[in-house]
Image (cartoon, helix red, strand yellow):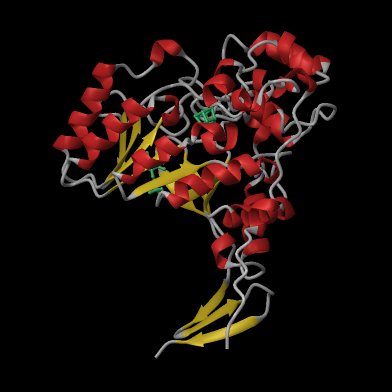
Amino acid sequence: MAYEIVTKNTVRDRFKSPARPAIWADTPEKDWNNWVWQQQKRIKSMDVLEKVLNVTQEERDAFAQSHEMFNMGITPYYASLMDKDDPNCPIRLQSVPKKGELFVAPIDLEDPLGEEKDMPVPGITHRYPDRVLFYTTHNCPVYCRHCTRKRKVSDPSSAAQTRQLEEGLAYIEAHKEIRDVVISGGDPLSNSDERLEYILSRLRAMDHIEVFRLGTRNLVTLPQRITDSFAQMLRKYHPVFVHTHFNHPKECTQEAFDACAKLADAGCVIHNQMVLLKGVNDDPKIVKELNHKLLMMRVRPYYIFQCDMAQGISHFRTPVEKGIEIIQALRGWTSGMAVPQYVIDGPGGGGKIPIFPNYIQGREGKKWILRNYKGDRYEYIEP
Ligand SMILES: *Cc1c(COP(=O)(O)O)cnc(C)c1O
Ligand code: SF4
């Protein structure tokens, strides 16, 4: 018997493009879809932001007092995801300055993850036995208000120069125990294709390097950056892993879908690292919806990070119980593929520490007393 094959890709149709704010209504498609245009038209001043949103007095004041410490930068695309009237819009909270940023809590840390401490050469953090973080730029298309690397990101004086890049590559080359390189920043996709290809080709030429990852938020903030020629370039250097940072279902647009599709079609494996943020995604329903959308975009939820103790982000921090509650609301209730690992990055350089809901209720000799996702009790007896 013959089957009728249904080939229409209906999943893409479930993702919508945002409506453009009026100031860009007449921008030609070819500009709007061009990442260079998006990058050049980034919103950096209140004057332009006022044309896109109904800015609140609090946001105006926070911008005036914060922009010298940490720039504002928002691509027109990312701004088009914002609610123009709601100051608590999750996209707006992540990219428009708020008063909370100006407050440094007594417990805040200057280098919350101790990244400087584990820096054998500038631009490399070598904390774990077999893998390193490699900083290749300090620019990003959108400056996330919750960024852990605020001290560095957006500061042109700290940009990774060619000499630093070469020193980093030399360090990786000399350390044969390294098999995995996390190419980071800032956002490594702020580098030109040419510079990125240079980095990838140098790493691929090292026999001890097995895998590398591009840690990028461009899929979220500037999906136009994923051009066909960029995706094709990556094919030469497989296996290439891409680690991205979606925080809210509103970020899962058709543009983001297409950017992920290009990378996945080119053979990349894409993982998501969400940061748990008060007012943005501290709700199991939102995280579940986000993770379901990510899977449809061929992105596997990998980590949920507890918001760390960096300065000026205490207004984003949630209790640890919130993260545990979210994992508990996912595990068993939805596909295991949609359940990431919840971690706290040990302040001062402890690395990622996994936090689990407690499914072990007790142990009596060879008998383990467990509970399942519904809270029912089970006993497993060892041989
Ligand atoms: C997160 C991180 C890595 C990668 O950790 P994985 O758990 O392998 O994803 C490597 N080095 C540093 C310093 C990190 O913070
Ligand atoms: S993209 Fe990453 S590095 Fe850049 S501002 Fe956002 S969180 Fe920080």
Q: Is residue 326 visible?
A: no
Give the position of the N terminus as an image quadrant: bottom right
Residue nearest the viewer, comparing 116 with 41: 41
Vertical side of 130 occupied by 82: above or below: above
Horizontal and vertical percent for residue 331?
Answer: 61, 66
- Residue that lies at the very extreme toward the front in this rendered image: 2
Residue nearest the viewer, comparing 305 with 190: 190
Residue nearest the viewer, comparing 336 with 177: 336
- Residue that lies at the very extreme toward the bottom in this rendered image: 383
The quarter of the picture where residue 372 lies is bottom right
Give the position of the C terminus as an image quadrant: bottom left
Horizontal and vertical percent for residue 358?
Answer: 58, 66
The quarter of the picture where residue 134 lies is top left
Q: Residue at x 62, y 28 (%)?
A: 313
Q: Residue at x 65, y 45 (%)?
A: 252
Q: Is residue 24 visible?
A: yes
Q: Residue at x 85, y 27 (%)?
A: 85
Horizontal and vertical percent for residue 80?
Answer: 72, 29
- Judge from the rendering whether residue 237 lies leftward or rightward of residue 189; answer left or right: left
Vertical side of 220 occupied by 1: above or below: below
> How many labels sit on residues?
0
Vertical side of 72 occupied by 316: above or below: below
Horizontal and vertical percent for residue 195?
Answer: 32, 25
